[in-house]
Image: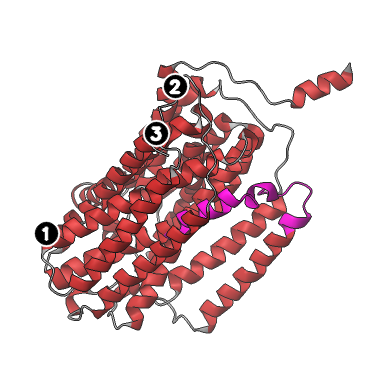
Amino acid sequence: MNKAVSEAAIAPAEALPLSESEKNAIIGGVLLSMLLAALDQTIVAPALPTIARSLGHAEYLPWIVTGYLLTATAMAPLYGKISDVYGRRPTVYAAVLIFLAGSLVSALAPNMLVLVAGRAIQGAGGGGLFALTQTVIGDLVPPRERARYAAWISGTWAVASIAGPLLGGTFAEHLHWSLIFWINIPLGLLAMAIINMPLKKLPITAKHHRIDGLGALLLIVATSLLLLALNWGGSAYPWMSREILGLLACSAVFWGGFALRLMRAAEPLVSLEVLGNPIVLAGTLSMFLLQAASVGLSVYLPVYLQSIVGLSVSQSGTALLGLMLGTVAGATFSGRTIPRFFHYKRIAMVGTAFAILCLGVLSLVAGHASLLLVEVLTTCVGLGTGTTFPVATVSVQNAVDRAHLGVATGVLTFLRSLGAALGVAMLGAVALGYGLPLAGEGTPDAGQITSTAPFVMIFLATAAMLLLSLVMLGLMPEKPLRGHPETAAPVLAE
């Protein structure tokens, strides 16, 4: 009898039925949580000069951004495993509370050191919110219906990309820079209130498992060292300096230790079954390369618009909307179309190929293109790349069982964040190699640029990354999407 009780105690909990209103409440709440984390990647930059005047020690300003990026990226896969073990609700709550604690520390920071620490705490929570949002949506709806929610996630990122700089600049210029962090408190509490009751009905799928602490530590240290090298390379230190090479070497050692731990641990942080799945492997690598291209392009496109097309700083920011909105539109189209295609992977492959073509045209006309032509081409690039986000996400989640959903989504989120950092670093290396002058903190100085050669090579390098992403998509096996027969959309095309 004791054995039966013991087995019952570790058995996965069964899901209680959720109404449509409860599902929508959960999705709205986790998207609001993710919006907070995404905003804090973009809202701080316009306020950095004001913060430097207020707190001093301007030499540490880059750490306000880097500190958040380091912890957010390193923690994403750990949250996926924790949520698989202890359930989504306590893990989501922990991520929100850690994020709000970091916001409070940042808002009350009396000096730069405390502010950087607060930002690192924020990132430790924000990295979980990125991964858990997609995981919770994966719990609520089957893969066949899940694709349309990917457009909501892309829309959330677009809102953060647009609203973040506007809010950050307004708060810093007209009110007080600390409002950048205070605003998170009521919004975070609202998100927790919305999802409190409905999340109780989600099951705990793997309660009898445990967390590999040593593996988590090795992953966090390896990722942090790599991101430090990528952030400092070409700006704080030359790429071939002993500091950058030392960071890369140390990172490689810890990555080797993490790989060894995965093979030897009784229950590794990331299941070898998940990593060995060809769909997960190809899908996450495709997302990694796509995000590297997308974020890198979004960083250097405004510099091109300012120096070659002749726009002001604010005008170049507005012109970037074409790329952002195109990405949302592409993801929306893809998400709505996936359930109607048997070979749904082709949607992303056609979209990515179209984006590569548009970047090729942009590289050819870079020296004499009008603003209208640039807007059309970059919007089309966004449309093409946007189609991949739902396909890759749904494919990876559809490839694993429910017990590994959090881990697979965490790995996808981790590589997506790492791709963003690597993309900026890679295109920065291309820019430096072709003589793009840099201002303070390693940022391009648009006022000193007269040649189009660096931008031609940046556009071609972005196209090359998308081409590699297309290759990964081509290698990714297709698995029929799971879904409820009574709700599945009719297949329109093979």
Residue corresponding to mark 3: 340
Where is residue 331? Give x, y as percent: 34, 43
Quick check: can you spot residue 439? no
- Depth check: 257 or 187 in front? 257
- Depth check: 129 or 175 in front? 129
Kind of element beneath mark 1:
helix
Residue corresponding to mark 1: 372
In this image, 138 relative to 359: left or right?
right
Kind of element beneath mark 2:
loop
Separation of disc 2 and disc 1 at Cα?
42 Å
Residue corresponding to mark 2: 487
288 vs 459: above or below? above
Separation of disc 3 and disc 1 at Cα?
34 Å
Looking at the rendered structure, the kind of residue marked 2 is Thr
Where is residue 49? Give x, y as percent: 27, 62
Separation of disc 2 and disc 3 at Cα?
12 Å
Where is residue 38? Give x, y as percent: 38, 46
Quadrant position of residue 311: bottom left
- Looking at marks 3 and 1 on the same chain, the residue that comes earlier in the sequence is marked by 3
